[in-house]
Image: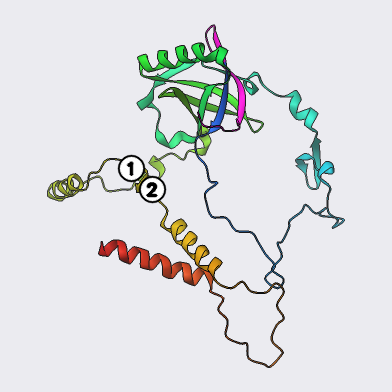
Amino acid sequence: MASRRPYWRGYLKLSLVTCPVAMVPATSESEKVRFHTLNKETGNRVVSQYIDSVTGKPVKDEDEAKGYERGEDDYVILTDDDLESVELETVRTIDIEKFVSRDKIEWIYLDTPYYLTANEKIGDEAFAVIREAMKAQNVVGVSRVVLGRRERAVVLEPRGDGIVIWTLRFGDEVRPENEYFSGINKKSDAKGVAALEKVIKKRMKDWSPEMVSDPIQESLLKLIADKKKAKPAKKGAAKSKKGEEDKPSNVVNIMDALKKSVAQDIKSRKAG
């Protein structure tokens, strides 16, 4: 089993069956190319900090607090103890009280996926019983859990030896499709549909993660590798004197190079 630090620990409950579980994110952005903001004059990193809007002075971490605005420049301050006092039972327990058919949940409501596993050996059997019971009935469980101090509706879907939890978007976050699709022409040309059906059949493939590869990411990594080989510019190099023309530089404009690299990649794909 892969070793991952749990994002959430608690209990999974169905009727009288309870077991300790752990939840980890099912997706990761750790491989994504990330940039730091630098001072281009010195090459040093730029740091950000909270500044008091009135005094203009930096605020220490221990002095930061949550505030709810009740009027102009008037806030109700909430401490960590205040926030903990309103914690719900779902902070530590996922109690499955409802079940629905998997195909009845519209994909647009699915938000963020997590992997749920038994957290202790003593709970393996109870976890397996809950998982296999849902598999046998071909259903997903509907429950609620507190994540990031906010209670979220979730669905639990058995997958292999584990369970995938999807947080669900709130109802008011999903816009009604009728507001956007109502004016679309419903008629279609039968011959045109038949012709495109043939095209679709020819292009049918088995699903593969390669279908969602990121050419921009690949091009960025190549560009960064090329720039690593180049001689690094001296930190805080002096500017040219006023009136003197700047000397030619081997520094590549990253966006121009990136666009060129992507264009060449697309061209080679088409040629292939």
Q: Residue flagged by tag 2: what amino acid is it?
A: Val
| Residue 21 within the segment the image draws in magenta | no
Residue on which disc 2 sits? 212
Q: Would you say residue 120 is visible in this rendering?
A: yes
Q: How many marks?
A: 2
Q: Is residue 245 above or below residue 124?
A: below
Q: Which mark is residue 208?
A: 1
**Residue farthest top in this picture:** 16
Q: Amino acid at mark 1?
A: Ser
Q: Position of residue 41 (x, y in %)?
A: 70, 73
Q: Which residues are magenta?
A: 1-19
| Residue at the (50%, 67%) spot, across then down | 226
Quarter holding the C terminus is bottom left
| Residues packed near mark 2 inside 10 Å, few (<14), some (14 to 19) or many (20 plus) | few
- Residue at horizontal 47 percent and vertical 67 percent from the top: 258
Q: Position of residue 224 (x, y in %)?
A: 52, 63
Q: Is residue 210 left or right of residue 80?
A: left
Q: Secondary structure at mark 2?
A: helix
Secondary structure, mark 1, is loop
Give how far across and how far down residue 101 sits, in percent: 37, 21
